[in-house]
Image (spheres, grey):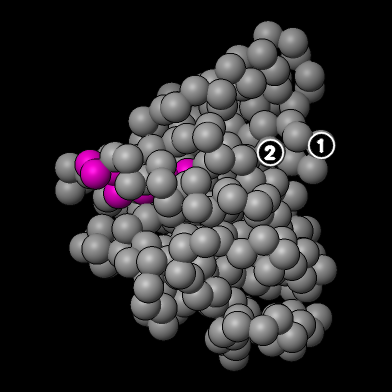
């Protein structure tokens, strides 16, 4: 089997149905399987996914977070390539096959991520440099200006997302990885419940001498944050825990300062 598409869902039934519908309406030419891992949703997401023919549903009895649920889907899959796909995405016709071809064009690349856009076609800065304090400040400053509609920042993000890049990471909202590479690094680190697991995963990939590709040849619609919006306080707490866990793993000398920073911010 060429591809396994793994979709993690949590209380985002409408988004999940739209995502699966976009795949069903224009399925990839590549031989593939679709696996939905439902993190103990209470909105009928698992039942809704079962209504789609050919979709395998893994219903977790608890909400284990994105990384653990993704790993459960990966371990149950059989494809030579793995596509981690958010439930709040829409997949245009031909996008998955093009992403596979882009990865195949680069044997030294283990991971490929597409251009992500919102429902109005506005691009998302879905890749970047390794998380460090300086890089976080730069990225967040650019994103704040971009979100305010600053013309210079809008032009910069538009330009960056139109160019093929070799970044340190691409977003886990739509991340294609070769199974051999994913298994070589032990899949996703499950200490990250939600957020930064994609950056950490790509860092592990790169540590083995493999590369991460961002390609604008593929465009995926990302509606962003639907699962998180159902529980905003828990989502913010999960972000803080994952953020701190990331620094404890990659920048342990800075982690105590970050812990104080999060404490001061409540």
User: What residue is shown at x 60% (from left), y 83% (from top)?
Assistant: 54
**Residue in the foreground of this view, choosing between 219 and 75:** 219
Query: What residue is pinned by disc 2?
Result: 117
Q: Nearer the viewer, residue 235 or 164?
A: 164
- Which of the numbered marks, if any, corresponds to residue 225? none
Instruction: Tell me if 145 is positioned left or right of 29 in this view.
Output: right
The stretch drawn in magenta includes residue 232:
no
- In what element is the residue under mark 2? strand
**Relative to 147, residue 255 above or below:** below
The residue positioned 38% from the left and 38% from the top of the image is 213
Residue 235 seen in render: no
**What distance separates the C-alpha of mark 2 from that of mark 1?**
8 Å
123 lies above or below 154: below
Q: Position of residue 207 (x, y in %)?
A: 20, 45
The one nearer the camera, 95 or 129, is 95
Q: Compared to 265, does 31 lie above or below?
A: below
Q: Is residue 48 visible?
A: yes
Q: Name the residue at the front extreme.
A: 29
Graded by Cα atoms within 10 Å as few (under 14), some (14 to 19) or many (20 or more), the crowding at tag 2 reads many
Task: Label the magenta part by its dominant secondary structure.
Answer: strand
Please state which of residues 260 and 92 is positioned toward the viewer in this rendering.
Answer: 92
Residue drawn at x 64%, y 21% is 158
Magenta region: which residues? 107-113
**Mark 2 in CB contact with mark 1 (< 8 angstroms):** yes
Q: Secondary structure at mark 1?
A: loop
Q: Quadrant of the N terminus?
A: bottom left
Where residue 33 appears, as percent x and y from the top left, is 50, 75
Image x and y of residue 199, in percent: 42, 46
Residue at left 72%, top 64%? 25
- Label disc, if present, on residue 120 of the rendered structure: 1
Q: Is residue 3 toward the left or the right of residue 221 in the image? A: left
């Amino acid at each position: 089997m060429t591809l396994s598409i793994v979709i993690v869902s949590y209380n985002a039934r409408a988004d999940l149905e739209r995502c699966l519908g976009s795949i069903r309406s224009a399925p990839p030419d590549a031989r593939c399987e679709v696996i939905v891992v439902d993190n103990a949703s209470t909105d009928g997401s698992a039942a809704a996914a079962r209504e789609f023919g050919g979709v395998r549903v893994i219903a977790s009895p608890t909400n284990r977070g994105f990384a653990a649920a993704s790993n459960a889907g990966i371990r149950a899959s059989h494809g030579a390539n793995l596509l981690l796909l958010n439930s709040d995405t829409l997949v245009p016709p031909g996008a998955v096959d093009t992403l596979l071809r882009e990865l195949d064009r680069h044997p030294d690349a283990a991971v490929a991520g597409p251009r992500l856009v919102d429902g109005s076609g506005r691009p998302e800065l879905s890749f970047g440099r390794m998380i460090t304090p300086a890089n976080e400040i730069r990225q967040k400053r650019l994103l704040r200006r971009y979100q305010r509609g600053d013309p210079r920042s809008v032009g910069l993000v538009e330009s960056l997302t139109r160019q093929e890049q070799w970044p340190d990471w691409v977003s886990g909202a739509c991340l294609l990885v070769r199974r051999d590479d994913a298994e070589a690094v032990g899949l996703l680190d499950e200490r990250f419940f939600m957020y930064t697991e994609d950056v950490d995963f790509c860092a592990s990939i790169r540590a083995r001498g493999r590369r991460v590709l961002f390609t604008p040849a593929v465009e995926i619609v990302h509606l962003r944050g639907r699962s998180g919006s159902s529980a905003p306080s828990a989502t913010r707490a999960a972000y803080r825990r994952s953020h701190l866990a990331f620094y404890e793993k990659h920048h342990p000398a800075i982690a105590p300062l970050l812990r104080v920073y999060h404490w001061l911010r409540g």
